[in-house]
Amino acid sequence: MELIERLQSKSAKIGVIGLGYVGLPLAVEKAKVGFDVIGFDIQQNRVDLVNQGINYIGDVIEDELRTLVKGGRIQASSDYSLLKDVDVVAICVPTPLDKYKQPDISYVVASTKEIARYLHPGMLVVLESTTYPGTTEEVLKPILEDTGFECGKDFYLAYSPERVDPGNKYFKTKNTPKVIGGITADCTKIAATLYEQVLEGQVHKVSSPAVAELEKILENTFRNINIALANEMAILCDRMGIDVWEVIDAAKTKPYGFMAFYPGPGLGGHCIPIDPWYLAWKAREYNYHTRLIEIAGEINTSMPGFVVERVSHLLNEETKPIKESNVLILGVAYKKDIDDYRESPVIEIMEILEKMGAHVQFCDTHIKTFTYRGKIYEGIPLTEEALVKADIVVITTDHSGFDYQMIGQHAKLIFDTRNVMKNVTVVHKLYRL
């Protein structure tokens, strides 16, 4: 096939729609191996930054991006008419939930409609955004075939779920195995050829887009449910007066049949708190109620309230009400060593504390300021003075950049939701989740 030959020779032009946490790293990796790449985004500030060689995604190396832009390997645009010149286009746009926890695939649909306007024979379209099983076949394929072109004959369509773990020091886009499922065997073969040129990780082919869509949701549902179990154990251990961290450490000495998951202040990010609800929504079409998924979701979303309950109890032990207390939150990002606060449970913790009358400040080594519901939150430096002033210090994100020795020396009362203080000398009082 001509497209396979062009992919193998790196002469094919690649388009990537969506220049966020998934799209930009993918575009960079494709350009690094020799493809010419056009990145598309409706946010003009992202387009401008990319064209200046300025990086805004943690997993992208700015010097590499700058070199690729200067060398003409990558350009960014908000002009979708440039799709007429690309041979392959990957869709990497957000797929959030609406207020009813139902899938919002409007960005995927809008992107597909733009592609349809410029669809041409021999073109490969790959959806990477996480979504419910059936999206590629039931939503994308009809839109693209409304042009009069036939999938598998005139153009090719596949699903290959993104696998991005922000802050992971070993697994990046380049070396993470890739799953691919095409509408037809030729669709799968061509899409696999593309990623085999770009990635070092294994390319695993499956029988259909629906299999690939469901395996992605299974990955994150697995984590969601096991984290919920760890969180429920933390709640129970608190009531029983048992150290949940010691329990987990003991359990993981078993060399088989157990995988350690850890409790925390709640779930955040763009995947684990969201993706299982896609499956729960789709299951209703088949008259099935995913009880385990929904119960896990309830447990995880209850954790910010549990953290505030513990904070209230600990302050009460010091004869201090939450109202008018000074609370210092350490970490707003949803996980360590990243600047991503999407769906972060810490923001809900701060909001609840403020509604209860506490004076809340935060420090984050990766986030200096953020906006939530129209309010701008400004972080403060982590200083001895800030620690001494706080009635309670709540560690909600275990960033490597925090000086835990200083925290242990100067904080009067510490509530550690990440067990990061386990080997730190604490002068005053320390409590753990």
Image: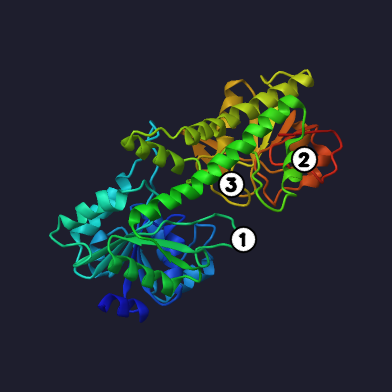
Report how far apart the C-alphas of labels 2 and 1 lie in the structure: 26 Å
Q: Return the residue at label 2.
A: 246
Quadrant of the rendered image containing residue 16: bottom left
Q: CA distance from mark 3 to mark 1?
A: 19 Å
Q: Which one is in front, 147 or 82?
A: 147
Image quadrant holding the C terminus, namely top right
* 194 lies above or below 422: below
Q: Is residue 388 above or below residue 70?
A: above
The amino acid marked with disc number 1 is Lys
- Of badges 2 and 1, the one in the foreground is 2
Give the quadrant of residue 326: top right
User: What is the three-letter code of the residue carrying label 2?
Assistant: Glu
Q: Amino acid at mark 3?
A: Ile
**Residue 433 visible to an observer of this rendering:** yes
Mark 3 secondary-structure assignment = loop
Of tags 2 and 3, the one toward the viewer is 2
Q: Which residue is mark 1?
A: 169
Give the residue at x 67% y 48%.
399
Left or right, residue 159 beside residue 299:
left
Disc 3 target residue: 367
Report the coloring of the rendering.
rainbow
Viewer-nearest residue: 14 or 271: 271
Say whether disc 3 or disc 1 marks the residue closer to the N-terminus.
1
For the N terminus, the image quarter is bottom left
Query: Which element is circle 1 on?
Result: loop
Label located before the other in sequence (2 or 1): 1
Give x and y (percent) for residue 149.
Answer: 15, 62
Residue 306 screen position, x and y as percent: 63, 27
